[in-house]
Image (cartoon, rainbow, N blue to C red):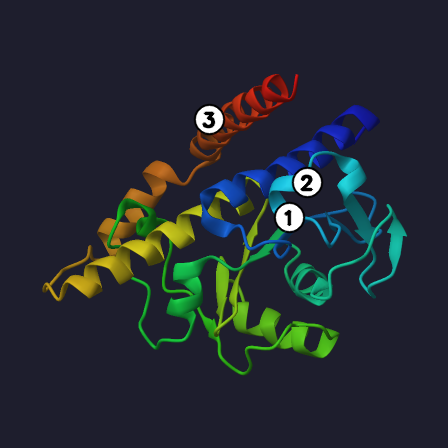
């Protein structure tokens, strides 16, 4: 990866934070997305004490090694860096991890209900595991390992009374997994609140729908849309300041 490509990937990581903030994952200064460093030094992630909507450039990112040492960047490291280090250690097939606290997913994490394909977003997923050992911050590698083991080969893991951790082969995929997971959970909770009897697609139907929408081209299409929206929002904000 050359310097231009590397810089573009860091820009994409910054945008992932802003997009997730707009999509219901904003939680004041909490929440972060990581990207595996292509040189094998560790992973890049948001610095602490700023909101996801405030991640504007690579100056807002840190390079953290797998033992939690900050190798590059300035600012404080998030306490929950072990979520990223231990999932990335366990999952060589993915290069990006997100950890956020979207409202509906926090509620769902404390239930024993399986995830169903109620709305179109639900077809992206099989049932996802739930880590219900503690609601505490995942501040130690030991807890991070147990979260990663609960995640296994799944797209995401619900953290009881806490939030979610979600993954992707790329930053783009990871971002869309986070967006779609919260949307799927919101739909399931909403229909349950009605008291109506309801149905969901069988496994074969769900898998067929997933193949239609969860593809590299499909993810790129969604990403290009949220990129345009992000650019328009930033341009409007800049105009207002001027």
The residue to which callout 2 is attached is 55
At horizontal 53% and vertical 38% (from top left) the residue drawn is 19
Judge left or right: residue 90 versus residue 160. right
The residue to which callout 1 is attached is 51
At horizontal 64% and vertical 48% (from top left) the residue drawn is 51
> What percent of the width, then of the height, locates residue 26?
53, 50
Secondary structure type for disc 1: loop
Secondary structure type for disc 2: loop
* Mark 2 crowdedness (10 Å alpha carbons): few <14, some 14-19, many ≥20: many
Q: Nearer the viewer, residue 201 or 187?
A: 187
Separation of residues labelled 3 and 2 (CA atoms): 19 Å
Judge left or right: residue 124 versus residue 86. left
Query: Which numbered disc covers residue 225?
Result: 3
Q: Are marks 1 and 3 in contact (CB under 8 Å)?
A: no
* Mark 1 crowdedness (10 Å alpha carbons): few <14, some 14-19, many ≥20: some
At horizontal 31% and vertical 73% (from top left) the residue drawn is 113
> What percent of the width, then of the height, locates residue 193?
20, 64
Separation of residues labelled 1 and 3 (CA atoms): 22 Å
């Amino acid at each position: 990866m050359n310097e231009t490509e590397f810089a573009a990937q860091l820009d994409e990581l910054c945008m992932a934070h802003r997009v997730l903030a707009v999509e219901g994952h904003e939680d004041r200064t909490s929440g972060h997305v990581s990207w595996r460093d292509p040189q094998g030094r560790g992973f890049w992630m948001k610095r602490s004490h700023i909101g996801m909507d405030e991640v504007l450039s690579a100056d807002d990112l840190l390079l953290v090694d797998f033992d939690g040492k900050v190798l590059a960047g300035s600012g404080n490291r998030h306490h929950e860096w072990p979520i990223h280090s231990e999932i990335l250690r366990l999952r060589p097939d993915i290069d990006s991890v997100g950890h956020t606290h979207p409202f509906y997913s926090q509620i769902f994490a404390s239930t024993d209900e399986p995830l169903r394909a109620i709305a179109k977003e639900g077809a992206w997923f099989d049932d996802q595991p739930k880590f219900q050992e503690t609601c505490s911050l995942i501040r130690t590698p030991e807890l991070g390992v147990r979260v990663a083991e609960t995640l296994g080969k799944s797209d995401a893991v619900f953290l009881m009374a806490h939030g979610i951790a979600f993954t992707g082969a790329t930053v783009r995929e990871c971002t869309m997994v986070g967006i779609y997971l919260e949307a799927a959970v919101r739909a399931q909770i909403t229909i349950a609140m009605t008291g109506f009897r309801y149905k969901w697609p069988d496994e074969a139907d769900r898998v067929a729908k997933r193949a239609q929408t969860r593809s590299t081209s499909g993810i790129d299409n969604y990403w290009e849309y949220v990129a345009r929206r992000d650019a328009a929002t930033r341009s409007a904000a800049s105009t207002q300041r001027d």
